[in-house]
Image (cartoon, rainbow, N blue to C red):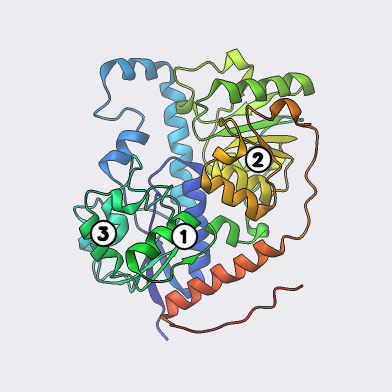
Amino acid sequence: MQKKKIGIITLSASDNCGSLLQSYALKQLMSKYGDVEIINFSSEQSHKIYDVFPKSMDYRKKLERLPYKERLFTEKEDYNFFRHEYLQISGREYFSENLSMLNGSYDVVVVGSDQVWNVCMGDFDNAFFLGWTKARKIAYAPSLGGHDIRESKFYEKVWDWLNDFSAISVREEFGKRCLEEILNNTIEKVLDPTLVLSDEIWRELIHEPLIKGDYIFYYSWAYADKWTSKIVSEEGKRLGVPVIVMDTRKWIGKSVEKWNFILNPESGPLVFLNLMYYAKKCYVESFHGMIFSYIYKKNFWLLDIHENYDDIDTRLAELLELLGVKHRVLTRYNVDKINQDESIEYGENKRLKRERNLSKLFLEKAIKGVQNEVCLFDYGT
C-alpha cells in the first residue's frame, strides 16, 4: 500500500521553544502513518516578530538592539539549526498568498497544535484554517488561546473552512465548547503532542550538561514581570546557586545584572531542554515550560502574576489539573506561605496515561478516515 503524504502546518516559523518542540512531537507521532513534512510556512507578521532586524522596525529600536547583534544572530542560528536538523524544514518559504501552490502535494494536511487558532495572536494567519488546500483536513490540538473564533473579522469564511475538516480536535476545554457551539457537533479534546510523545524520546535529545554544578533554570515566555524575577533572584541567593535564563531578545531593555541572572550564550529548543533537564530547580512562566519540567520530573514552580489561583490562565489551570500539580503555583497572594523547598513526589499519572491513549486513537482514526469506531484501551485500575 502506498504511503500517505502528510503535510503539517503549524507555528514552525516562531523562534519559540514550545512551538518548535510541539512541531517535533507532532511530526514524530504522524510518521507512523506516512511520509510527513512540516510545511515551511511563515508570514510577514512572524518575520516582524522574530527577525533580528525586521524591515518595519523603527530606527530607535534598531539602535537598542545593536549592542546585542552578535548574540541575536547566534541565537537565531540555534533555532534554525533545530528547524533544519530535527524538523527537516527546508526549501521554499511559503506565505498564505502562495500556499495553494502545494495543492496536490499531500493526501492529508494537519494543522496544530499550539495557538494556531488564536485569532488574536500576533502571528495568527487564516492559512491555519486550511482554506488553501483540497487535501483531507485534520486539526490536532489547536489552542484558541482563550479567544472565541467568532471574534475574527473573517468569521463567515472561518465557518466554511471549519466545516470542510474531516476531523477536528482541540487542546483545551474552552476551545471544545466554542467549536461545539459553532459547528453543532461533538469536538474531541486531546493532549498537546509533547505530552503524547514518550518520555524516553525526550530524554534522547539530552546531551552533556551545558552548565557545570547546581543552578536554577528560570524560563519565561517574556520575562516581562519584575515580581517574578525578584522571586527567582531571591531564591538563587538563598540557595547560593546561579540563576540561568535564556533568549537575549527577551532581555533587551531589561537588566539581567540587576537580578544577578546569567544569560546563557546559546538558545533554541535543544538548549532549553538541556538547561531544564540538569537544573537543580526550575521556575517557569510558560505552558511548555511546565510540560517539560513535568516530563523531566523536576522540582519546579509555576510563576503567575495574578493575585490568586482562580485568575490563572485557563490553559495553565487545565494543565496543572491534568498533571496533578495544582499545588506548584506561586502567586503574589501565596508566595509568603509556600515552602519552596518542598519537592514533588512523582508517581503514575493514570489520567495522563488514559488521555495519551485517547489522543493517539484520535490521530489514528483521523488519518485512516475511520468514523464512529469504538476502540478500547486497558488503562489499568
Give the left or right position of residue 180, taking residue 225 as reference.
Answer: left
Q: Which of these two is toward me, 7 or 367?
A: 367
In the rendered image, the vertical position of residue 194 relative to residue 213, given as above or below: below
In what quadrant of the picture does the N terminus appear?
Answer: bottom left
Q: Nearer the viewer, mark 1 or mark 2?
A: 1
Q: Mark 2 points at which residue?
A: 276
Q: Is residue 204 visible?
A: no
Task: Look at label 2 and name its amino acid.
Answer: Met
Q: Is residue 42 visible?
A: yes
Q: Nearer the viewer, mark 1 or mark 3?
A: 3
In what quadrant of the picture does the C terminus appear?
Answer: bottom right
Q: State the image coordinates of residue 297 (x, y, percent, origin top left).
A: 73, 48
Furthest residue in direction top, as rendered: 258
Task: Look at label 1 and name its amino acid.
Answer: Ala
Q: Mark 3 points at which residue?
A: 158
In the rendered image, the vertical position of residue 103 relative to residue 113, given as above or below: below
For the residues bearing labels 1 and 3, Cβ distance under 8 angstroms: no
